[in-house]
Every structure is written in C-alpha cells, then in structure tokens.
Image (tube, rainbow, N blue to C red):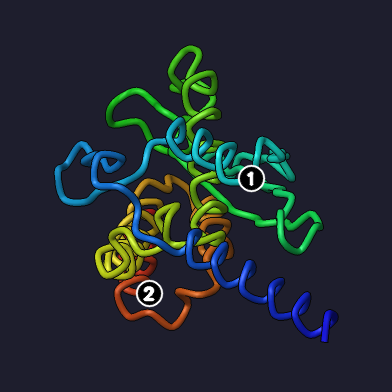
Amino acid sequence: METTLTKTGAVDLLQDFTAKLNSQPMREWLKKTPDNKAEYIPIGILENQLREDFNGLVQYEVLSERRELNEYIVSARIKVFHPVLMQWLNYDGIGAVQIMQDSGASISQFNDTKKKNALQMNAPKAYAEAIKNAAKKIGKKYGADVNRQFEEAYVTDVTLDSVTEDLAKCSTLAELNETWQLYPDYHTNTRFKHAFTTRKNQIV
C-alpha cells in the first residue's frame, strides 16, 4: 500500500511539474519583433525563468558553430536537472543569423565587405537564437506555441526568399553550383530551379 501511494504521489508530482512547464508564458514577457509582426520571449527572461523553475540547476553548452557563406550558425544545448525525475535532461536548438556586409555586396565579396566586428555582434545573436530554440522544446512556458502559425509560414517563405537571393548574388558558375549544392531540399522547388537557371544564363 505504501509503495502504491509513493508511486501515485510521484506521478502526481510529475504531472504537476509538466503542467507548470506547459503553462502559457506571461503576457509581460512577450516582446514585439522589429517588424511588429510577431512576438518573442527575450533570452534574459528565458534564462531567469529556467533558473527559477529548475532551482538553478541549468547548464548551457555550445555544441558547434560555423559559417556558411554569409550566415553564422550555432548549435547549442540546454541541460536541466528535472526535480521529479531526478536526472539531467538535454534539449538542443539551432540558431542562424546573417553576417553583416556592406550594402549591395555579393557573397563572393564577403571577405572584403564584411562589416568590422560583425561577428562580435552576430555570433551572440546566433547563440541566443539557438538557446531560445532549445528552450521551446522544454515546454509552452518558454515559447513553444508563441507565433506557431506565423513561424510555420514564415520559415518556409523566408528561407526560400533567402536561398533564391543567395543564387542571385553568385558571380561565377562555380559559386552558383556550390550554392545549389548547399540546398538539396529545394532542388525540386520550381521557384528555386527558375532562380538557378536565370542566374546561370546571366553569368554565361
């Protein structure tokens, strides 16, 4: 009987804690994006809330960082010690930002046109985006459902816009082919193929 009560109590605690993690974020946490089209939870608020909910037992780790063409990409991990399960859990996320260049510059001119100290500004932002992406996987409280409908449409449209822009910036066939190979998921996309063919004809 005692064992049954203990197990039942543990299940109740787990359900209560899970419900806490999946509560809606407080309205005052949410900030508007610069274009005023969506909302987000600032990284500082997320980190403070994680410390509070997990009794300070939170760790952050950069798994990888790299530059691809004019983008800086960071993969990061949040490690939290679950107070009911009594074990560490890992949540991974990824963030990417464009490295600032001079206005109108092409990717082929990146090394000459990169803004001074651009990485000092862009790298922390990519890291913050990776942490925010990882935090969403912990629960709704950390932004899992914020802008979900907007983001599903936004990611598809903006990603396609950005990759076709990358094709348009290519100045040689070698660079064009390299860019094509970077985006295999778009090889069957009519708009992407059209942008590739158009730029190829312009270069030739």
Q: Position of residue 5 (x, y in %)?
A: 75, 80
Q: Is residue 104 above or below residue 140?
A: above
Q: Is residue 97 above or below residue 186?
A: above
Mark 1–mark 2 distance (CA, rounded to whole Å): 48 Å
Q: Quadrant of the C terminus?
A: bottom left
Q: Which residue is mark 2?
A: 193
Choose between 201 and 29: the one closer to the eye: 29
Q: Are marks 1 and 2 in contact (CB under 8 Å)?
A: no
Farthest residue in the left direction? 36
Question: Identity of the amino acid at label 1?
Answer: Phe
Q: Residues within 10 Å of mark 1 (few under 14, many from 20)?
A: few
Is residue 113 visible in this depiction of the protein? yes
Q: Residue at x 48, y 60 (%)?
A: 20
Q: Position of residue 133 (x, y in %)?
A: 51, 52
Query: Number of numbered discs present?
Result: 2
Choose between 107 and 155: the one closer to the eye: 155
Q: Position of residue 4 (x, y in %)?
A: 79, 85
Q: Which residue is mark 1?
A: 54
Q: Residues within 10 Å of mark 2 (few under 14, many from 20)?
A: some
Q: Residue at x 56, y 59 (%)?
A: 138
Determine the secondary structure under disc 1: loop
Q: Position of residue 84 (x, y in %)?
A: 72, 61
**Mark 1 or mark 2, whichever is nearer to me:** 1
Choose between 9 and 97: the one closer to the eye: 9
Question: Identity of the amino acid at label 2?
Answer: Lys
Q: Residue at x 42, y 48 (%)?
A: 170
Is residue 204 visible in this depiction of the protein? no
